[in-house]
Image: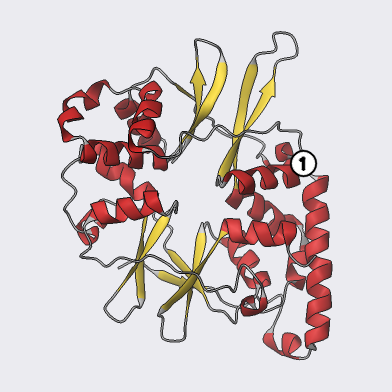
Amino acid sequence: MAEVSKTVPSSAAPNDFILSLSDEQIEHDQKIGIKAIRLFLQSKTSYDVLPVSYRLIVLDTSLLVKKSLNILLQNNIVSAPLWNNQNSRFAGLLTSSDFINVIQYYFQFPEKFEFVDQLTLDGLRDIEKAIGVQQIETVSIHPFKSLYEACVKMLESRARRIPLIDEDEKTHREIVVSVLTQYRILKFVALNCKETKMLLKPIRNIQGLGTIKDISTCTMNTPVIEVIHLLAHKSVSSVPIVDEQGKLINVYEAVDILALVKGGMYTDLDLSVGDALLRRAEDFEGVHTCTLNDRLSTIMDTIRKSRLHRLFVVDDEGKLVSVITLSDVLNYILFGED
């Protein structure tokens, strides 16, 4: 069973201080805080978020899919920009969703499995057309565009990350600078924007965050192929795992698929989620939760301290209620409280 981490109140905003505030004061401060964070995002460029030094792996589209997977796993990354060497241009972003598409393709067309070792990254587009799913993400942004604009582009395209693409002034060739994630942006905000401490409105009162969502779930006994279908058809990055009482006990993520594909398991996917989790990497970040009574200030403090991609909302008994994604948080910061 995975460790389920509960979001705890920040010492920067103790409960006795919050309780002393009126609802009107909390509402007023929330609006001021959101506007300040929005101005912060508009004043900073995507380049500002990048660390002083970092590693970037770019994959050529002629590379075999199985080799690209090994590169991702060996370097402990879950995505990589693609480069078309024939026209010297950025060709999209390889993510775990593309490997989910590969699994679905060979599950639907097992007679094609003999050609899996020859499949190249170029061939992923044909696979996506064959099973009728969204093609490789190609959205990108210039690194000197504002963070606000980068966030808008990600939300509009429903992408969780966006490549930063520059251009050589002399040759006009594209240059892949880095890949910016929603998590990196929100952590940048949490580290540098003190106004996050003003976001004291309970989540239950925030439209988009406190909204109860219809969530697809699975159990430890659910066949992996059913979860893969949920990930693809619902366009989600994870499926929560619950017990017989509906209590959250773990999560199966799209990135967990990578370990299965590495083992060559494109067609034999009747194994249970519980068995599949035994292949999960040891550095799994765990499952983060919150309640509807928690506040965005607390969530931002958790993002500052821990690497996370979503928070599952649970009740007092630990039963799953809803989920808050980083897209939800970004969407509220950009467009909420108007």
Q: Secondary structure at mark 1?
A: loop
Colour mode of the rendering:
secondary structure
Numbered label tally: 1
Is residue 263 visible from the viewing direction of this image? no
Left or right: 41 in relation to 289: right
Quarter occupied by the C terminus: bottom right
How far across and down, in percent of the image, does residue 321 sit? 46, 76
Is residue 26 visible from the viewing direction of this image? yes
- Nearer to us in this view, 159 or 297: 159
How far across and down, in percent of the image, does residue 234 sit? 42, 54
Q: Which residue is depicted at the point 65% across and 55% down?
A: 186
- Nearer to us in this view, 52 or 302: 302
Q: Is residue 237 above or below residue 291?
A: above
- Nearer to us in this view, 127 or 143: 127
How far across and down, in percent of the image, does residue 237 sit? 44, 53
Q: Which residue is depicted at the point 23% across and 62% down?
A: 222
Q: Which residue is mark 1?
A: 146
- Graded by Cα atoms within 10 Å as few (under 14), some (14 to 19) or many (20 or more), the crowding at tag 1 reads some
Q: Which residue is depicted at the point 20% across and 37% down?
A: 264
Left or right: 99 in relation to 321: left
Q: Amino acid at mark 1?
A: Ser
